[in-house]
């Protein structure tokens, strides 16, 4: 019997396992999917600035704390495994294509400054001077203006995921390819869980299965809202990198990699558990890239993939102990912020599982919290993002 069994082999699950093992616990991870099939692997890896500011909500506190931890983890992971996860403060351009969007981005820029983030407003020609590859889009009127967040960062999720996996194994974590088939509860405890690899027993259990967490939580008497939201991404290979920064236009973006690859993303689709790519979506993303960068005659579409983000009804993940099940914990529902919030989530869950004093207040993330009907108006909620995606595509 191990001290803790983590259900889920994505970035959240592996981060929790790594943190627990670093504190001397024996840990087993049940990974339903190979690395490549997780939402974590499929993510773009954009980290917006994460300042702490007066009155910031609980999600911002978790993100700011996680952001600081990421810098330490990146160094530690490279020291432990030799893998550079390419955490870079590359900066991010946020562009407007029409006057209506300019007004919205001006409000957004003012909001960033109020929060204490560095933010510079740029007209179209200045944007082109900062990123020459966008000059054609500026000349064609497809980019009018926008702002620069110099502290926006990017990370390379597949490399981060592999570094976590290797770090976990070096710390003694057992990673078992298995699907959970039943979680029986008796007398307020999980005594063992049934999996495709047989019975697994542990002192404590942490459910971190992304979009699949909602169904797995039901036997625990817990109603989570982690509905899957599909995001499709295209990977281009270029002879040389033509962008220095992340470029955001609405909910679509371009993310440059050090080796000349360019990510083009992403869709936002309420498509259930269908993680297949769609030809129409791939064409839409390629059109977006060509609109901003031109014909790209030397570019090669290397691959396309889709991930299922675990949605959150109120913009916050569910983190903490399961009520009435003394040895069960949950870390799920991060939606678009899971990669960014993974480090803080890991430390918070490790504090709660080991009985330590948590570094941040866990109460706002209570898995049993009551989510009111108007919570979906939160800008980070699933419904708010879907509504924005529909409006921008209209």
Image: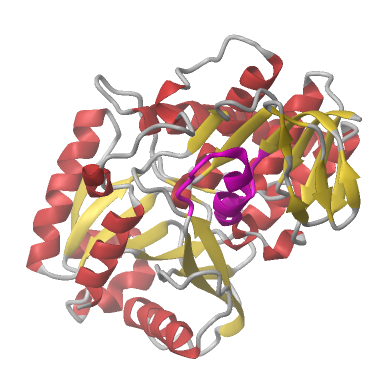
The residue segment tinted magenta is: 207-226
| Residue 49 as seen in the image, left or right of residue 257 | left
Residue depicted at x 71% and y 26%: 187
**Residue 48 image-quadrant placement:** top left
Residue depicted at x 24% and y 45%: 373
| Residue 76 as seen in the image, left or right of residue 363 | right
**Residue 298 image-quadrant placement:** bottom right
| Residue 117 as seen in the image, left or right of residue 2 | left
Q: How was the colour assigned to the protein in this rendering?
A: secondary structure
Task: Examine the rendered structure and indicate whether residue 239 appears above or below residue 210.
Answer: below
Name the quarter where the N terminus is drawn: top right
| Residue 348 as seen in the image, left or right of residue 135 | right
Residue 169 percent location from the top left of the image: 88, 40
Q: Is residue 218 magenta?
A: yes
Residue 237 percent location from the top left of the image: 60, 77
**Residue 32 image-quadrant placement:** bottom right
Task: Examine the rendered structure and indicate whether residue 348 appears above or below residue 147.
Answer: above
Name the quarter where the C terminus is drawn: bottom left
| Of the pair 176 and 193, the residue shown nearer to us | 193
Residue 218 percent location from the top left of the image: 58, 47
Determine if residue 90 is in view.
Answer: no
Q: Does the magenta stretch include residue 222?
A: yes
Determine if residue 26 is in view.
Answer: yes
Residue 11 percent location from the top left of the image: 65, 46
Q: Which residue lies furthest to the front in this view?
A: 187
Residue depicted at x 25% and y 71%: 390
Q: How many labels does the image show?
A: 0
Task: Examine the rendered structure and indicate whether residue 382 appears above or below residue 65.
Answer: below
Residue depicted at x 36% and y 79%: 288
């Amino acid at each position: 019997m191990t001290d803790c069994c983590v259900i889920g082999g994505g970035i959240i699950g592996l981060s929790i396992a790594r943190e627990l093992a670093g504190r001397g616990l024996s840990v087993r991870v049940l990974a339903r999917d190979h690395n490549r099939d997780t939402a974590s692997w499929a993510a773009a890896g954009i980290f917006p600035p994460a300042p702490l500011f007066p009155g910031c909500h609980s999600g911002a506190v978790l993100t700011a704390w996680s952001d600081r931890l990421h810098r330490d983890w990146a160094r530690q992971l490279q020291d432990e495994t030799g893998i550079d996860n390419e955490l870079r403060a590359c900066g991010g351009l946020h562009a407007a294509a029409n006057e209506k969007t300019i007004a919205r981005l001006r409000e957004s820029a003012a909001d960033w400054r109020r929060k204490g983030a560095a933010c510079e407003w740029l007209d179209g020609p200045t944007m082109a001077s900062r990123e020459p590859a966008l000059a054609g889009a500026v000349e064609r009127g497809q980019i009018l203006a926008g702002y620069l967040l110099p502290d926006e960062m990017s990370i390379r999720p597949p490399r981060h995921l592999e570094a976590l996996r290797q770090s976990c194994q070096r710390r003694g974590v057992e990673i078992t390819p298995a699907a959970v088939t039943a979680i029986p509860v008796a007398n307020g405890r999980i005594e063992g869980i049934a999996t495709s690899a047989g019975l697994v027993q542990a002192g404590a259990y942490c459910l971190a299965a992304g979009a699949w967490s909602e169904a797995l939580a039901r036997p625990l008497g817990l109603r989570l809202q982690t509905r899957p939201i599909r995001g499709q991404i295209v990977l281009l290979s270029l002879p040389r990198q033509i962008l220095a920064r992340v470029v955001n236009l609405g909910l679509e973006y371009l993310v440059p990699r050090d080796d000349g690859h360019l990510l083009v993303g992403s869709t936002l689709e309420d498509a259930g558990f269908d993680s297949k790519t769609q030809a129409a979506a791939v064409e839409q993303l390629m059109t977006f890239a060509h609109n901003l960068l031109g014909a790209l005659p030397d570019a090669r579409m290397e691959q396309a993939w889709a991930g299922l983000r675990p949605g959150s009804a109120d913009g916050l993940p569910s983190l903490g102990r399961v009520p009435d099940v003394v040895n069960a914990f949950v870390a799920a529902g991060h939606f678009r912020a899971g990669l960014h919030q993974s480090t803080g989530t890991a430390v918070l869950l490790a504090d709660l599982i080991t009985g330590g004093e948590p570094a941040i207040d866990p109460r706002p993330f209570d898995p049993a919290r009551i989510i009111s009907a108007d919570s979906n108006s939160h800008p980070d909620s699933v419904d708010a993002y879907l509504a924005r995606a529909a409006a921008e595509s209209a």
